[in-house]
Image (cartoon, rainbow, N blue to C red):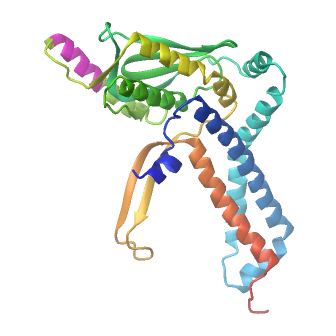
Amino acid sequence: MGDLARRFLKEPGADDAAHYARRVRRLAVSYVALFALSIIGIAILIWRAQFFVTLAQRSNVETLTLAFLMVLFGYLASLSAPGTWGAFQILRRSRARDWTERQHRLTHGRHPVPGNRTVADLNVLIEVEGSPGQPFDVLVADAAGAMGRLHVDGARLTYRSEYGEGSNEVLAYVERQVEQLVRADGSDADVDIVIWKKIDDEGAERYHGLVEFARNLERKLGDGALWPRVVLTPADVAELERRLTAVCTSLRKEAYLPHWDYQAEHKLPIIPEPLGLITLSRSQERVDPASSMGGAIVVVFSVLAILVVFIIAPPWVPGT
């Protein structure tokens, strides 16, 4: 995948806490912008309804197109409304002067979700030096309190959030941090999440079963590794915990925002429509909500720009 697609479509895990904070702010702003633009679109269509209907009829354009735009704006407004409300909640609860008070206000606005967990599987096993094959936990907490706990068992990452729904982006962040740590120790291993349980539940369990089979067979044979792995030192685990502590403030804010995590397929027609004989396509296991909402904003803004241009400079059409 090219750098442009990787940056704006996949949006991999944050490099550091500052990057994670910027992503949360951008996601909150995206929900507000999408909601505002959708409401503006509905208002314009209602305000100049007669103008657009007349324009459509005289230009031989299907009038139903206007109904489609109305449904599109309404759907995107309803989709972004929870995120917009969450963004205003973040703003309202972040107005205290003291940092600790701000964090407590953000925490008290969310309720614990019993049994809540976010799961993803890596392409490698993660082990701690001196404890091969043993799972380990990393507490996600700062001075204002605990946000959750990360459980690492072989290739499976499980994040149990104390508040809110729990975000896949936490695990994407862990993936990136683990890769940085092992490369700092001299390894050139690639650490990637290959499947997300919230997106593909059955596929995640099939992959997890295959990994566990390889681990059990390795223990039975006792003769070499059957699955690739990376080894963290105790100092690496402590550093990982420190880096997770650094994003706790962002996690409290992110808990107010919905997580629209879905697979995506990118298509590039070699021969354009209407022929469309050859098309290149590539599937992506997960597209970050910040990227997908950003794409929706571009589409809505483009449609609004066209509507405004038609109002300001109406195109020539045959008279009645």
Q: Is residue 217 part of the magenta span, yes or no? A: yes
- Can residue 197 be spotted in the picture? no
* Residue drawn where x is 74% and y is 89% of the image: 317
Numbered-mark total: 0
Placement of the C terminus among the 4 image quadrants: bottom right
**In the picture provided, is 145 more to the left or to the right than 7?**
right
The image position of residue 30, as x and y in percent, is: 68, 46
**In the picture provided, is 211 more to the left or to the right than 279?**
left
> Magenta span covers which residues?
210-220
The image position of residue 17, as x and y in percent, is: 59, 29
Instruction: Find residue 261 and report its image quarter.
Output: top right
Q: Is residue 258 part of the magenta span, yes or no? A: no
- Main SS, magenta region, reads helix
Decide which of 299, 178 is in the foreground and name it.
178
Look at the picture and state if 23 lies above or below 150: below
Instruction: Find residue 188 and report its image quarter.
Output: top left
Decide which of 236, 119 is in the foreground and name it.
236
